[in-house]
Structures are given as C-alpha cells and as structure tokens.
Image (spheres, helix red, strand yellow):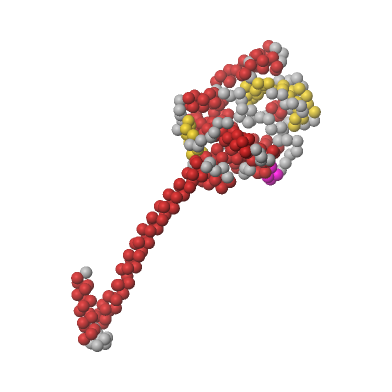
Amino acid sequence: MIKRFLNKRKAKKTVEETGGRITNDTVEAHREVILSKGRKFKYPLQYAKHKLVINTIIIGVLAIGAACVIGWVQYYKLQNTGTVAYRFSKYLRLPVAEVDGQTVLYSDYLMQYRSNTIAIERQEGKLSNKDDAERQINYYKRMAMDNSILNAYAIKLAKEYDIEVNRGRIDKVYGQHVASGDNKVTESGFEKLIEDNFGLSIDEYRRMFIELPLLRQDVSVRIDTKAKELVKEVESALSKNGGNFENVAKRFSDKVFLEPSGGLVSVQNFDGGRAAEADKLKVGGISKPFLSTSGDGYYIVKLLKKEDRKVEYASLRIPLTELKNRIEQLKKDGKIKEYITIKNE
C-alpha cells in the first residue's frame, strides 16, 4: 500500500515536470496516473458487491422463514383444505401425523378428505346450516385422518414383509372399475366422471381407490391368521346346514355379515368382485371364499337369480380385523401422533 502511494506521488511529479507530454521516458508514469484514478472507482464497487451478496442472503433467509411461518399457519393452524394447499402439500411432502414411526402424508389426508366432501357436495349441495356443516366437516376430517393413518401403517408393514402391489395388478383392477356399471364408458369418459364427482385425477384415483386398498388387503391377509381360521369355520358351517346363509350369519354374530345384492345387478357391478363371482355359478350354487377386490375381507356368495348379464346374490363377508386391532393398540400405547386438531362432534 505504501509502495503504491509512493509510486503514485512519483508518477504525478514526473508528469507535471514534463508538462503532461507523453515521451518514452514518461509512458510508465502516465500509465500509473491513469490507473490510480481508476482505483478509486474499483474499491467502492467491490464493497457494493460484497454488501449486495450479504443483503441477498439476509432477504433469502427472511423469505424462507416467512414462507415457513405462513405454511405452518395455513396447514397446521387454519387447516387449509383448498386446491392450492393440496397441490403444494404433494410437493412438500408435509406430515399430518405419525404412526409407529411412519409418516402420514398431509397430501394423502387431503386427497381422502377432499374426495369425500366434493362427492357429497356434488350429490347434496352445500349445507346451509353452519352447525351441521361444521359437524359434517369434522366427521369427514376424522374419517380421512383415520384412513390415512391406517394406510400409512400398512405401508410400513408392507416394507417389513416385502409386499408390493405391481402396476399390472393396479391396471387390471382399474379396467374393472372403468367397465363397472350398466353402461360401459370409455377411459376418457371415466376420467371426466372421476374428476367431476371426486375432484381427483386418474393417478390420484388409482392411488386412493386401488393401490392403497390392495396394499392394505395384502398386509391384512399376511398378518390376519384369525380371519383365515374363521373362513374355514364358515365353510364347514355352510356345508353342514345346507348352505343357509342366514343361519350362519346368526351363528357367528358380529364376526360374519350377511350382505345381499338387493336385486339384480350388473355382473360388472363395483362390489368387491361379488357379482363377477356369482356370474360363474349356477342358480343356488355357492362360491369358494375369495378376497374382495376392494380390500375389506373375504367373501362367499350364493347365486339367487340370473338374467342376461345381471345377477342377484347373497353374500357372507368375513372382515380382516387384525390391522385395525393393531392400530387401536398403537393408540393406547401412545404411538400415534396427530399434528392437527380435529374436533370430536
């Protein structure tokens, strides 16, 4: 620094002595004078750059902090269930609860809740009474939370047991959903139907109504040995009393449920596969036990009537209960944490 200052003084003196003329002897002196004049602009600019970087970092940190606070208020305080909040939750992968160390995704909770409420609004319209509306909202929030916790725990157990639902199986069940009902619709028509009635994309529908129920069913079958034993007992009871479904249902009380079709239904009816199985039988015939395609347990069906592509049947349902029983035990053990508060109505 001192050397530069001395060089600057020397160069200035030399230039003044020559009257500002540039000669071979004074070229270096002139160069030093010009550079010294430029340096006074260089160092302030460097300081400005340094300050700009610091300010940018500070603003960035404050912006991130503000976004986190706003997000926390929107999701965990106000419990925003709007479309924008749902879309952001899918990318942010926020937790809404935790079950035995497994994260319950906020996006899965909102997907469940929104599909239920949108379906109700499409069918019945919005409730005019504020108290009734609040009770219904809390009811569907609780249902969505419980279902999301159950699914998350099933995902945890599926990893432990190396259980996976492959794409081919999902595609097959999805095709059955598209073809269900009296009038076969195109895939694009079905997509619009799902969006209009549930507010879901096809990928969201496949996850919520096919992939997760199938995964839950596979896990339940793996861990529920009691249900398998009960199926054998029901089969034995049917063979002994001539296939009387009513008597068997009464005998096993709250463990087995009699569920008739309620009249003729399409063989493609969306009923867990019961109509399709009934279609394979002769009138009065009884099927072997089979797993529901909707993941709610085992079915045994009896064909009562058949006309064209329609069937009437009676069915016995043997539910899979072990997974839910484990969830109840986890609640008692304090291993389920919910990060939002849902009022009990």
Residue 44 x/y as whole percent: 32, 68
Q: Residue at x 75, y 30 (%)?
A: 265
Q: Is residue 343 visible?
A: yes
Residue 91 x/y as whole percent: 51, 46
Q: Tell me which segment is drawn in magenta.
A: 188-193
Seen in the picture, residue 135 relative to 14 is either above or below; the reply is above
Left or right of 246, for residue 335 = left
Say which quadrant the N terminus sits in.
Answer: bottom left
Left or right of 124, for residue 339 = left
Per the image, is 191 magenta?
yes
Which of the 4 image quadrants contains residue 298?
A: top right
Q: Number of callouts in the render?
A: 0
Seen in the picture, residue 15 relative to 67 is either above or below; the reply is below
Asked whether 138 or 247 is in front, the reply is 138
Left or right of 138, for residue 273 = right
Left or right of 16, for residue 315 = right
Q: Residue at x 49, y 44 (%)?
A: 73
Our reading of the magenta stretch's main secondary structure is helix
Asked whether 246 or 215 is in front, the reply is 246
Q: Residue furthest right?
A: 307
Which of the 4 image quadrants contains residue 255?
A: top right
Per the image, is 73 magenta?
no
Q: Residue at x 66, y 29 (%)?
A: 272
Residue 30 x/y as whole percent: 26, 81
Q: Is residue 209 visible?
A: no
Q: Residue at x 22, y 72 (%)?
A: 4
Say which quadrant the C terminus sits in.
Answer: top right
Asked whether 206 or 17 is in front, the reply is 17
Which of the 4 image quadrants contains residue 121?
A: top right
